């Protein structure tokens, strides 16, 4: 249900396969988010100290959190540049249960 909502927000062909970040993208997004929040927290602390009010500190910090959310939450193409390469499944025509395999191996002895 959530996936259908996300796909409907991005009505581009083939978007269903490209709505999630890869592992390297998640690592980059985490680093960018922490950097933005720390920078804005430092700036907010300095401005709050200068203006002598905690409200300014929290407003600057909140702006940093909002910016970090906009930059890191959507699956921008920069976060999808290292897709996983899955192995192709092996098709086996000889599918037997474990009991059949054991009985076959006992008969050889």
Image (cartoon, grey):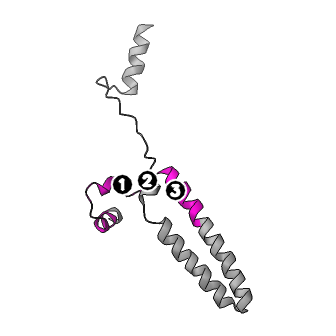
User: Image quadrant for the N terminus?
Assistant: bottom left
Viewer-side label of 2, 3: 2
Query: Is label 1 in contact with label 2 (beta carbons under 8 Å)?
Result: yes
- Of label 2 and label 3, which has the lower sequence position? 3
Q: How many marks?
A: 3
Q: Residue at x 56, y 75 (%)?
A: 65
* Residue beneath disc 1: 18
Q: Are marks 1 and 3 in contact (CB under 8 Å)?
A: no
Give the spatial CA distance, label 1 vs label 3: 14 Å
Q: Earlier in the sequence, mark 1 or mark 3?
A: 1
Q: Find disc 3 in the rendering and name its residue.
A: 26
Mark number for residue 80?
Answer: 2
Residue sticking out furthest to the top = 109
**As drawn, is 7 to the left or to the right of 87?**
left
Instruction: Name the spot of residue 58 as percent of width and height, x first.
Output: 63, 84
Kindly report the distance in space between the C-alpha atoms of the residues bearing marks 2 and 3: 9 Å
Q: Which stretch did the figure color magenta?
A: 4-33
Residue 8 magenta-highlighted: yes
Residue 50: percent from left, percent from top:
73, 88
Q: Position of residue 25 (x, y in %)?
A: 50, 54
Residue located at (70% from left, 81% from top): 45
Circle number at residue 91: none
Residue ranking furthest to the bottom: 52
**Helix, strand or loop status at disc 1:** helix
Q: Residue at x 60, y 69 (%)?
A: 36
């Amino acid at each position: 249900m959530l996936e259908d909502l996300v796909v409907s927000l991005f009505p581009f062909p083939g978007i269903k396969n490209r709505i999630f970040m890869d592992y390297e993208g998640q690592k980059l997004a985490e680093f960018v988010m922490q950097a933005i929040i720390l920078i804005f927290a430092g700036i907010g602390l300095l401005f709050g100290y200068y203006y002598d009010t905690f409200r300014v500190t929290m407003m600057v910090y909140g702006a940093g959190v909002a910016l970090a959310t906009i930059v890191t939450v959507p699956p921008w193409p920069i976060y999808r540049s290292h897709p996983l390469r899955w192995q192709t499944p092996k098709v086996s025509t000889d599918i037997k249960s474990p009991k059949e395999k054991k009985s076959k191996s006992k008969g050889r002895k």
